[in-house]
Every structure is written in structure tokens, then in C-alpha cells.
Image (spheres, rainbow, N blue to C red):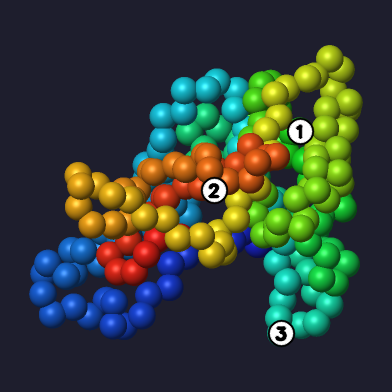
Amino acid sequence: LCNSEVLCNSEVLCNSEVLCNSAAKLRSVTLKIALQINCKLGGELWALKIPMQGLMVCGIDVYHDPTRRGSSVASFVSSTNVTLTKWFSRASFQNPGDEIVNGLRTSFLAALKNYHEVNAQLPKSIIVYRDGVSDGQLSLVQEVELPQLASVFRNFDGYDPKLSLVVVQKRINTRIFAALSGKDLSNPPPGSIIDHTITKRNWYDFLLVSQHVRQGTVS
């Protein structure tokens, strides 16, 4: 006989969510629970139509635990399918307080091998989104992290994909206004892009308004 422990997907519910006073609210709660269970079982609720074939999207960030001094963890995720709904992930410990990832090569190599296992081929184009980097650290990303990513390609004979590294900064002080239809200044509509005049001159830089703001000014 052989005994084995098998974990099952579960969904924890509060009494306040289950005990509803109306049928409409119960229907809404039931639908949301079913959607969450579907995701945990590997289902896809919605997906984008990506025109590029053979694309892999990666994300990199470093978390610094404020409650535990000396604890910094680098996280890495990468897509494994065309619709960007399936993801591979890795985490590694950093030196305390370090924002630049020194062990990026191991995670990126594992991501490419996983992509090959799923798709029977390596990605033709790779887009890497890097979060949590200040202006003063941009040169370090170019000098330390980018060479790590590029060096991984040498592990595969004749492999030379297109690689793009995008640094994403969310905490900025820039405020953007738009004069629409000759009216007073207001927030630009979602999807607005500013890529000149106020952007960095020596970098391929742009500002994106990705959200709809009901109060205050967009940043």
C-alpha cells in the first residue's frame, strides 16, 4: 500500500458573504465565488488578443519587508502562453536593502526552459517589465541586470531573440492636465501618452495615463 497526501483547491467564505437577505445578492456572491474557484483551478476568465506570436512577458520586482530587518526578496514572473494567462514564477533572497537583482540569471534561465517545455519552442520576443527602480538606479539596471538577461541566451545554440526592458515607475510627482474642447483644464482621458517636452531627453521615456480619476489630478 502507498499513502499520499494530495492538496485540493479550496475557497474560504465568511458568514457575512454566505448569509444574504436577497436572492439578487446571493446570486452575485455565488457568481463571484464560482469565478474565484475557476481561476484557482487554472481557468481563464478573460484574455487579451496579442498580435505578436512567440511573445514572453516577464516582470521583476524586489520586496523589502519593513517588519523584518534584513529581509529582501526578488520576485520574477514570466508568461507561458499566447494569451498571457499562464505564468511561471520564481523568488530569491537578496542582500538586505538591495534593489538591483544579482541572481537574475538563474530565474530567467528557468523561465526560458519552462516556456520551452510548454510550447516546444523558445520565445521569439521577450518584454521585461522592471518595477521599483528610482531614477538614480536606471544606469545600474542597464549595467547589471540587462547583461544578466542577455547572457542567458548563450545557453541555447543559435538563440537570439528580441529583448526589450521597460522600467515602470508609479510613484512620480508629475501632474498632467489637458484642455479638451476649449474647456477648462481637466484630467486627460485614460490611455493618454506623453512622450516629449517633459520626458527624459537621453532615454526612450514616456508618461502613460492608465486610469480614470474621479477626484483630484492624475499622476
Q: Circles 1 and 3: CB distance less than 8 Å?
A: no
Cα distance between the residues tagged 1 and 2: 41 Å
At label 2, which amino acid type do we have?
Ile
Element type at mark 2: loop
Between 150 and 7, the one lying in front of the other is 150
Q: Residue at x 28, y 83 (%)?
A: 16
x%, y% of residue 107? 79, 46
Cα distance between the residues tagged 3 and 2: 38 Å
In the rendered image, the vertical position of residue 171 relative to residue 103, given as above or below: below
x%, y% of residue 43? 43, 45
Query: Which quadrant holds residue 132?
Result: bottom right
| Crowdedness near tag 3: few (<14), some (14–19) or many (≥20) residues, C-alpha within 10 Å | few
Residue 207, labelled with which disc?
none
Residue assigned mark 1: 113
x%, y% of residue 167? 65, 47
Residue 198, labelled with which disc?
2
x%, y% of residue 53? 55, 20
| Crowdedness near tag 1: few (<14), some (14–19) or many (≥20) residues, C-alpha within 10 Å | some
Element type at mark 3: loop
At label 1, which amino acid type do we have?
Lys
Q: Give the total number of marks visible in the rendering.
A: 3
At label 3, which amino acid type do we have?
Thr
Q: Residue at x 89, y 26 (%)?
A: 154
Say which label, 3 or 2, has the lower sequence index: 3
Q: Circles 1 and 2: CB distance less than 8 Å?
A: no
